[in-house]
Image (cartoon, helix red, strand yellow):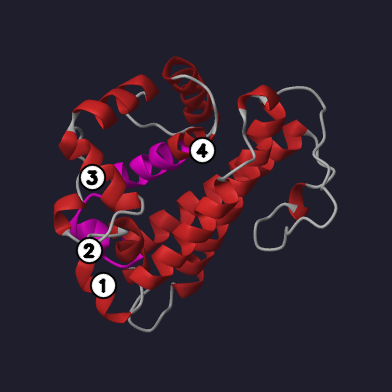
Amino acid sequence: MEGGMRVYRKSAGQENDAFGLDEIQGKSIDDILRLLINRKNQMDSWFEICSTESGFRDMMDNRQMGKDFWLYYLAKQLDFCVMNRTQKAKVLDLLLDAFHVENPMDAMSHFTYMNTNDSYYQYMNHCFGIADPDCAVFWILFSSMAGNDGERLSMTMGFIRSHMRFMMQLERYLQIMFPEWGFGQNMKNYMIRLNKYVLAALDGDRHAAANPDYLVNPIYPCM
């Protein structure tokens, strides 16, 4: 996925603070990719630490859920472009490889199952996406791993913040790499909606809305 030395320049008046766009101002496309890989690796580290130290991994092997998280959100980036499904599958496979996401589901299989397998579709959207009323299962579980005294709260909240920056910076990366395919239009609005949704789901009584039916990938239930 690494290209030439094209550089992202911030447009006047753009809101960059919470979205991580100041961080990539003036960086080459290769540097942006390295930054994204490092951010993804940090998020994976937090996920592993919280999963094991909280004892959740003793109750359930959630490693496939971690892989599906990246598959879902890398694919979500491609919702906001004008590529056809075959083109999206090629780019998604490149992204999965670039970020070392070792998911047994390849890109074309993911797109096929999302259209033909209701159990897989429901799992992916309810576990990771915006799907009331059984919402944000992944996010609710991950936040519960912060610990009774919040000893891992900095990791869980850092994960949420880093996710927004990752998605926004990845959009800019794709916009530079594929300027003709319409990237850079809608991810900001989606991430604002998702973060509001996740924070609401983590708030008090809405924890009860997390449906355990959406905990396990029906195609790869225990990988």
Of labels 3 and 4, earlier in sequence is: 4
Residue 65 image offset from top left, x and y in percent:
30, 46
Secondary structure category for the residue under label 4 = helix
Residue segment shown in magenta: 52-74
Q: CA distance from mark 2 to mark 4?
A: 24 Å
10 Å crowding of disc 1: few (<14), some (14-19), many (20+): some
Q: Is residue 20 left or right of residue 79?
A: right
- 160 to 115, vertically: above or below: below
Amino acid type indicated by mark 3: Tyr
Residue underneath mark 1: 207
Does residue 172 appear anywhere in the picture?
Answer: yes
Q: Which of the image's four quarters has the C terminus?
A: top left
- 86 to 99, vertically: above or below: above
Secondary structure category for the residue under label 2 = loop
Residue underneath mark 3: 123
Of labels 2 and 4, earlier in sequence is: 4
Amino acid type indicated by mark 2: Ala
Of labels 1 and 4, earlier in sequence is: 4
Residue 178 image offset from top left, x and y in percent:
66, 24
Of labels 1 and 3, earlier in sequence is: 3
